[in-house]
Image (tube, rainbow, N blue to C red):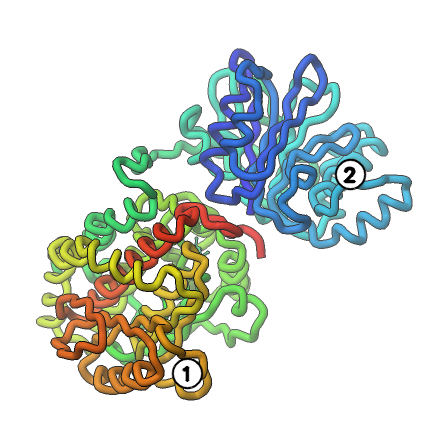
């Protein structure tokens, strides 16, 4: 993961530019942060553990430079300590790195044999040392970078500066994203154009095995063989310029509330003109099977789609965790459409899985939120979720936007393959148009969620159960709670508890459940009775009238299955939020996590 930024300017102090860039890149990690810049012709390095705010405090206010690089870290090799923080300086080379150097141990041994010694156990220090090794050997930057690219196994986006070279920043990349932002007299590098939009929206995208030399007025991009490459200068149009928290205490709460708009915004292109609009979605009838691939919350959105495709459109659908998919036999063939779901479009495992499908020239489709992200450039076709900037690490509005697209995709498919008739389609479209009215009362039940949170926030283990679609939702509910409250929470198929897990149920163990399927509700209720009999406290989300004092019930309206997942997940999101709030955790940036998971 990690975020890197660098800047060189003829007439600006770049230190504030680097800090703003890092603040905007914190979604990529926030274990430690650091900056390196030329000061009186010497490289000055300042590092801290923790978030960029701490770095800002540590830097003296009048710190000034016209060239520097900076980093916000999500620790992989080596703990989140100051010494392990970037930038790493190895003799002539000072570097920031995002990615993983897989052969760093072998390279380290080789360098130790050459008389090198290391201060850290990071792979990035080895990357700096290798660059230094070739730089001392060839005294030529092009040759140094080219040799480095041939030597390194792994992924990297690297920015570096060289002692006594006050006029250039160098950068290179393989598999980790890197862009070069361009403006008058100031050029920058960044993991993400959105991090430097305050300074420029014009940028070059660096492709794998490309590198660049950047000064105040020029950007020279080269291939791994040293040939100059002429690239398209892109322009980023920011549709979500307003990313402030507004009156909300946390981005997560703001983003949960924004679902009133984001679901409709995502759906609108496919519903506004009735069935005609719906049929602008890709025709899936030419495929025999659908594979859906994603990680975390995106994977959970895929599980919802599996239910919709299999149960409602009679179409085979498999869902895979990208981290598993990339190392298994996937029986890839041209009759299977692979759908890749990602908020960031930068998730390393999902990208790797997508590359496998592309290598076999098999059809693929992306459902992605971030425009111009790496995955959008790779997929055959992309359907954009219109969730807007999702800043909280816990995904909420991106999930419901993903479910929206998937629901509409299943609906259009059902219409095309005649498993869903015209009236049913029109009914669902009407529900989508009416989504704000359907979800606003659910969003507004703060007191209900808060009172549940008060009952559960001191617990150590919480279980989420459900059947069918409700089971898919319970997985998302459990993930939301554990990632922001740090309470151990697990999801189980309701019928599976008695095969082992029920032994963990004891007096007052919270069990959260949704039962929204008329055919399965009675079965689920029986399972709830079983945990109640063992002392559990049960909280039930349902769209059916259930009169039972032994459960705490949250009612949601009855709708079609295409809308239902959106309604079920909102109570789960808000229970997680208020529970974390009572526990006083870092809700928007939970420990050990990052918004964008760009390493394996
Ligand atoms: O950016 P992506 O959608 O590819 O990210 C996938 C997961 O890392 C992400 O959904 C993660 O599970 C969320 N933080 C969960 O809230």
Percent of width and height locating residue 468: 30, 78
Residue 397: where, in percent of width, then height?
30, 52
Q: Is residue 219 above or below residue 285?
A: above
Q: Quadrant of ligand 1?
A: bottom left
Residue placed most toward the observer, 585 or 83: 585
Asked if residue 81 shows in the view, the reply is: yes
The residue at 14%/78% (across/down) is 546
Q: Residue furthest front?
A: 507
Q: Left or right? Give the position of 142 relative to 484.
A: right
579 lies above or below 474: above
Q: Is residue 415 visible?
A: no
In this image, 447 relative to 55: left or right? left
Q: Indicate the position of residue 521 as horizontal and vertical percent values.
A: 22, 82
Position of residue 129 measured from the top left corner of the image (x, y, whole percent) = 78, 38
Q: CB atoms at circles 1 and 2 under 8 Å apart?
A: no
In the image, 95: left or right of 328? right
Labelled disc at residue 239:
none
What is the quadrant of residue 449 in the picture? bottom left
Foreground of the two, 112 or 145: 112
Name the residue rendered at 20%, 70% in the picture: 553
Which residue bears the numbered disc 1? 502
Q: Which residue is mark 2?
A: 129
Q: Which of these two is toward me, 476 or 526?
A: 526
Tell us which disc is closer to us: 1 or 2: 1
Q: CA distance from mark 1 to mark 2?
A: 54 Å
Q: Is residue 599 left or right of residue 273?
A: right
Q: Residue at x 36, y 46 (%)?
A: 390
Q: In the picture, residue 492 is in which quadrant?
A: bottom left
Secondary structure state at the residue bearing disc 1:
helix
Q: In this rendering, is residue 445 above or below 428?
A: above
């Amino acid at each position: 993961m990690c975020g890197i930024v660098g800047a060189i300017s003829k007439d600006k102090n770049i230190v504030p530019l680097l800090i703003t860039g890092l603040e905007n890149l914190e979604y990529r990690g926030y274990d430690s942060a650091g900056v390196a810049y030329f000061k009186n012709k010497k490289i000055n390095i300042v590092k801290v553990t923790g978030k960029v705010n701490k770095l800002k405090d540590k830097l003296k206010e009048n710190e000034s430079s016209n060239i520097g690089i900076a980093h916000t870290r999500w620790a992989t090799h080596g703990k989140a300590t100051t010494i392990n923080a970037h930038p790493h300086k190895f003799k002539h080379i000072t570097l920031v790195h995002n990615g993983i150097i897989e052969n760093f141990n072998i390279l380290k041994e080789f360098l130790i044999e050459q008389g090198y010694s290391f201060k850290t156990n990071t792979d990035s220090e080895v990357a700096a040392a290798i660059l230094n090794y070739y730089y001392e050997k060839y005294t030529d930057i092009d040759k140094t970078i080219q040799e480095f690219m041939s030597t390194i196994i792994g992924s990297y986006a690297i920015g570096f500066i060289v002692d006594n070279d006050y006029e250039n920043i160098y950068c290179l990349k393989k598999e980790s994203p890197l862009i070069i932002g361009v403006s008058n007299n100031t050029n920058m590098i960044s993991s993400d154009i959105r991090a430097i939009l305050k300074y420029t929206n014009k940028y070059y995208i660096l492709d794998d095995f490309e590198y660049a030399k950047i000064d105040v007025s020029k950007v020279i991009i080269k291939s791994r063989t040293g040939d100059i490459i002429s690239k398209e200068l892109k322009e980023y149009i920011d549709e979500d310029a307003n990313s402030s928290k507004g009156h909300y205490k946390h981005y997560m709460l703001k983003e949960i509330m924004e679902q009133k708009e984001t679901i409709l915004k995502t759906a609108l292109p496919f519903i506004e003109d009735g069935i005609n609009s719906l049929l602008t979605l890709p025709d899936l009838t030419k495929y025999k099977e659908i594979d859906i691939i994603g990680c975390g919350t995106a994977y959970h959105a895929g599980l919802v789609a599996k239910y919709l495709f299999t149960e409602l459109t009679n179409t085979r659908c498999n869902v895979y965790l990208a981290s598993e998919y990339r190392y298994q036999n996937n029986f890839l063939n041209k009759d299977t459409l692979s759908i890749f779901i990602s908020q960031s479009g930068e998730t390393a495992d999902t990208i790797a899985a997508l590359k496998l499908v592309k290598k076999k020239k098999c059809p693929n489709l992306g459902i992605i939120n971030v425009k111009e992200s790496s995955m959008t450039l790779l997929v055959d076709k992309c359907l954009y979720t219109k969730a807007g900037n999702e800043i909280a690490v816990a995904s909420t509005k991106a999930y419901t936007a993903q479910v929206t697209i998937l629901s509409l995709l299943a609906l259009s498919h059902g219409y095309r393959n005649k498993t869903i008739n015209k009236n049913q389609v029109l009914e669902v479209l009407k529900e989508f148009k009416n989504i704000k009215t359907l979800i606003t009362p659910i969003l507004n039940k703060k007191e209900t969620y808060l009172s549940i949170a008060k009952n559960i926030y001191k617990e150590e283990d919480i279980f989420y159960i459900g059947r069918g679609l409700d089971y898919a939702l319970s997985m998302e509910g459990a993930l939301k709670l554990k990632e922001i409250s740090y309470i151990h929470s697990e999801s189980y198929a309701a019928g599976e508890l008695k095969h082992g897990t029920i032994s963990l149920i004891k007096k007052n163990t919270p069990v959260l459940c949704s039962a929204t399927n008329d055919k399965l509700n009675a079965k689920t209720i029986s399972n709830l009775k079983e945990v109640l009999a063992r002392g559990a406290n049960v909280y039930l989300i349902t769209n059916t009238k259930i009169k039972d004092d032994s459960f705490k019930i949250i009612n949601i309206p009855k709708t079609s299955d295409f809308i239902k997942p959106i309604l079920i997940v909102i109570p789960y999101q808000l229970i997680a939020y208020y529970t974390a709030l009572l526990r006083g955790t870092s809700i928007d940036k939970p420990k050990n996590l990052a918004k964008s998971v760009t390493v394996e």
